[in-house]
């Protein structure tokens, strides 16, 4: 009895400390003064003067520091074991698209994993450019299409989508069609490839499922401190999807645009940074750990994200909980890793948790690297008016509304992608 009482008090105190520590700041005047690391100066204080210096010295050292201190190393190689076409149709999406559902099989150390790519390809295009992005609740949620196979992978419950017992059902078919402007993509001659992210790694603090265990040795239960969290695992999945896409003769592999919203926007950025086969990258409301500068400590912070989602980054990233000022890097340098490929950073006005200004500044401070290649980026440090996109190679917009992916966002992405990648 006494023991339970003390345990309860201890729990209460911990919660109180936690609550106090993580009161988010939304007041610009309370943003601490901070030094933005110069993407064009190496850790040895050498100035990066040209593309060669960037590609040979600075880019690799930045990639390394993000890998070891934030997203985590992938502990080995794993290629697709086999490709299974589960279903295909020449006449999908009201006759506007070809559809394919392709299951990729993996196996390592006697353990197996598979994930399914749903593809919609515009019918009138011989080799289609593609948006490639994960969805949150299963492939069958992205369109009202009775032929999309329902995943049996673990899913977060969401009663409003009829998801209980962590299982997907018929009830959630099409519930996220509002987030995927498939019709508009197809009309613009661009296809969509999407994957349910939970098939690669279920989004929970449990490293015994998903892709991680395939790489474990002996009785290992958790990746090492410098090894991959879930975001690196999801971005690994995007690269494996790309391994398949390069073999699909219906796809223009030189025009695959990796897209993601929120945690999956952090993922698309990391995928773009680590895999240069992605021709362009879109980060929709990616916020903390995505496009937003961590050192601003505005909205979500490093300590908060690592506490609420301890499995997203590698354990080393926790060294910077409430110590953002000690970080020798910041998110603008992750954006710079994508240069000179087109990169779109998008914010939403009511999404202060993701720090729109921090996302803009991420793009602003990444711009010198894009300039090194003669590409245009972001030259303003104050937010532009809402719904007035800046469509440079490094593009930015802040739209009205909440944390979401809207028709408006897709209209900009499509227009920009067509311009940047010369899509007819
Ligand atoms: C939470 C989290 C964010 C994340 C978001 C999402 O709000 O704190 O970092 O981007 O979930 O993925 O929807």
Image: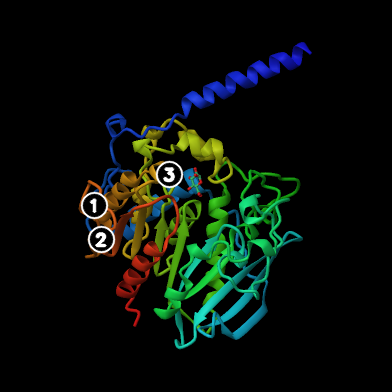
For label 3, the SS is loop
In the picture, the quarter occupied by the C terminus is bottom left
Does the rendering let one see residue 65?
yes
Going from N to C along the chain, the mark reached first, 2 or 3, is 3
Query: In terms of depth relative to the viewer, which is nearer, 219 or 44?
Result: 219
Going from N to C along the chain, the mark reached first, 1 or 3, is 3
**Residue occupying image coordinates x 39% and y 79%:** 188
Query: In terms of depth relative to the viewer, which is nearer, 230 or 186?
Result: 186
Going from N to C along the chain, the mark reached first, 2 or 1, is 1
Q: Which mark is residue 288?
A: 3
Query: Where 37 falls versus 255 (above or below)?
Result: above
Task: Count all numbered tags in the image, as a single digit.
Answer: 3
Q: Which residue is mark 2?
A: 390
Q: Which mark is residue 67?
A: none
**Residue occupying image coordinates x 45% and y 69%:** 181
Residue 114, located in which quarter of the rendered image? Answer: bottom right
| 384 left or right of 101 in image | left
Query: Where 125 falls versus 218 (above or below)?
Result: below
Query: In terms of depth relative to the viewer, which is nearer, 346 or 229?
Result: 346
Q: Which mark is residue 384?
A: 1
Q: Is mark 1 within 8 Å of ligand 1?
A: no
């Amino acid at each position: 009895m006494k023991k339970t009482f003390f345990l309860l008090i201890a729990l209460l105190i911990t919660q109180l400390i936690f609550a106090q520590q993580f009161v988010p700041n939304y007041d610009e005047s309370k943003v601490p003064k901070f030094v933005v690391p110069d993407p064009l100066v190496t850790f040895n204080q050498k100035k990066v003067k040209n593309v060669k210096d960037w590609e040979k010295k600075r880019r690799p050292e930045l990639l390394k520091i993000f890998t070891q201190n934030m997203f985590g190393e992938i502990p080995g190689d794993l290629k697709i074991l086999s490709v299974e076409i589960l279903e295909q149709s020449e006449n999908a999406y009201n006759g506007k698209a070809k559809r394919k559902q392709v299951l990729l099989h993996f196996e390592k150390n006697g353990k197996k994993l598979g994930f399914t790519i749903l593809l919609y390809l515009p019918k009138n295009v011989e080799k289609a450019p593609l948006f490639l992005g994960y969805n949150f609740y299963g492939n069958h949620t992205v369109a009202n299409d009775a032929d999309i196979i329902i995943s049996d992978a673990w899913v977060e419950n969401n009663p409003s989508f009829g998801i209980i017992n962590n299982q997907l059902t018929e009830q959630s078919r099409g519930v996220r069609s509002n987030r995927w402007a498939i019709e508009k993509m197809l009309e613009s001659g661009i296809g969509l490839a999407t994957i349910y992210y939970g098939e690669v790694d279920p989004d929970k603090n449990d490293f015994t499922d998903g892709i991680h265990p395939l790489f474990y040795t002996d009785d290992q239960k958790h990746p090492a401190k410098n090894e991959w969290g879930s975001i690196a695992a999801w971005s690994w999945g995007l690269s494996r999807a790309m391994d398949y896409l390069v073999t699909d003769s219906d796809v223009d592999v030189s025009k695959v645009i990796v897209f993601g919203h929120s945690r999956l926007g952090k993922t698309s950025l990391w995928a773009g940074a680590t895999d240069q086969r992605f021709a362009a990258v879109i980060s929709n409301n990616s916020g903390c750990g995505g496009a937003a500068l961590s050192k601003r400590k505005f909205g979500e912070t490093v300590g908060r994200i690592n506490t609420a989602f301890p499995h997203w980054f590698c354990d080393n990233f926790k060294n910077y909980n409430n110590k953002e000022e000690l970080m020798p890097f910041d998110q603008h340098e992750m954006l710079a890793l994508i240069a000179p490929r087109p990169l779109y950073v998008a914010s939403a006005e009511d999404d202060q948790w993701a720090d729109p200004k921090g996302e803009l500044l991420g793009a602003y401070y990444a711009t010198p690297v894009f300039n090194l290649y003669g590409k245009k980026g972001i030259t303003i440090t104050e937010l532009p008016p809402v719904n007035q996109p800046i469509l440079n190679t490094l593009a930015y917009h802040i739209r009205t509304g909440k944390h979401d992916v809207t028709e408006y966002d897709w209209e900009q992405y499509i227009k920009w992608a067509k311009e940047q990648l010369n899509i007819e």
